[in-house]
Amino acid sequence: MLTLYGQSFTSRLLLGTAQYPSPETLKRAVEASRAEIVTVSLRRESARARTGQGFWSLIEELGAKVLPNTAGCHTAKEAIATAKMARELFGTNWVKLEVIANDDTLQPDLFGLVEAAQTLSAEGFDVLPYTTEDLSAAERLVAAGCAVLMPWAAPIGSARGLINKDALKTLRAYFPDIPLIIDAGLGTPSHAAEAMEMGYDAVLLNTAIAKAGAPAQMAEAFAKAVEAGRLAFEAGLIEPRDMASPSTPVAGTPFFKIDHAS
Amino acid sequence: MQVLLNGEPFATEAVTLAELCASLGFADAKIATAVNGSFVAAASRGSTPLAPADEIEIVAPRQGG
């Protein structure tokens, strides 16, 4: 079971709702992924198009827990105001906190992130910060009140997988009791499986599924990979070694002779 | 009076934020609001007066990652 801020979930895959070719595809992908938590955003609503009103009906149909993000915010102030709007609109204290430093890398602004996390935690939010693998930032986020951390694997939408495995390993070892969710940068089911094998508690995906040729099928593939990776982690992986080690018993090998000459 | 609504210049007769929302057909809509960078709760819209050049954000649920 995955437990985040006192709520338990069977699925360890969190899914984004953006970039799908159609609302129907999004619905089928969420079902196939078996995700119990979906991320959403807030955007300006036009009086004429009223786009958000229709989208809200779709989200309600999914029946998943909604995790609003503060995507696109570049300062703590913007992120705090956005989180408050999201709390009222979606009726949840949960927020995927994003404070973006750079539009090319979509790298988190760790200073703004910590500042916003402090304020929001103090105001009763359950903050799930989108952060980097940086250990000192993680420590400050935990000190700020975050009981979950979401380090990136690689830049959002880049599909490059875990590009700094050493640091992610350190982070996992350093925070054995804090749920750690890999958020952003995963491209393939094997990337997700690898994160889970390393002991990460869950993964958050969007582009890799939404932009796949067949999103629902890819969602199923990721669901299986996440499950396989978690099972493997719980089973206890063997340590890699430099030299070969025969798996077949050596004792009783036919034609075996001791070389007396040597 | 001229305000900035969702980043665009907008002329309105509304005296409060609640009146502005109603005039846009958002009275019962799934929206959230902010004025000049600060969140304004739904319950406070009626008591939030608007002034010329106020920067008003009206947002709604949207796809997100």
Image (cartoon, coloured by chain):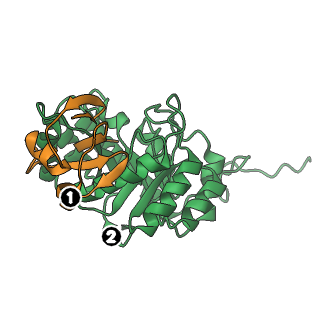
Chain colours: A green, B orange
Q: Quadrant of the N terminus of chain A?
A: bottom left
Q: Circle 1: is it few (<14), some (14-19), or many (20+) Cα within 10 Å?
A: few
Q: Circle 2: is it few (<14), some (14-19), or many (20+) Cα within 10 Å?
A: few
CA distance separating discs 2 and 1: 36 Å
Q: Note whether A4 is above or below A198 in the view shown.
A: below
Q: Is residue A55 visible?
A: yes
Q: Residue at x 55, y 56 (%)?
A: A114
Same subunit: marks 2 and 1: no
Query: Count of labels shown?
Result: 2
Disc assigned to residue A7: 2
Looking at numbered disc 2 in the image, what kind of residue is underneath it?
Gln
Q: Nearer the viewer, mark 2 or mark 1?
A: 1
Q: Who is closer to the viewer here, B30 or A258?
A: B30
Label 1 secondary element? helix
Q: Is residue A149 visible?
A: no
Q: Which residue is mark 1?
A: B47
Q: Residue at x 54, y 63 (%)?
A: A236
User: Which image quadrant is residue A124 in?
Assistant: bottom left
User: Which image quadrant is residue B10 in?
Assistant: top left
Residue A149 percent location from the top left of the image: 50, 58
Chain of the residue displaying label 1 = B
Residue A64 percent location from the top left of the image: 22, 56
Chain of the residue displaying label 2 = A
Residue A5 as seen in the image, left or right of residue B19 = right
Residue at the limit of the structure toward the bottom, as seen here: A6
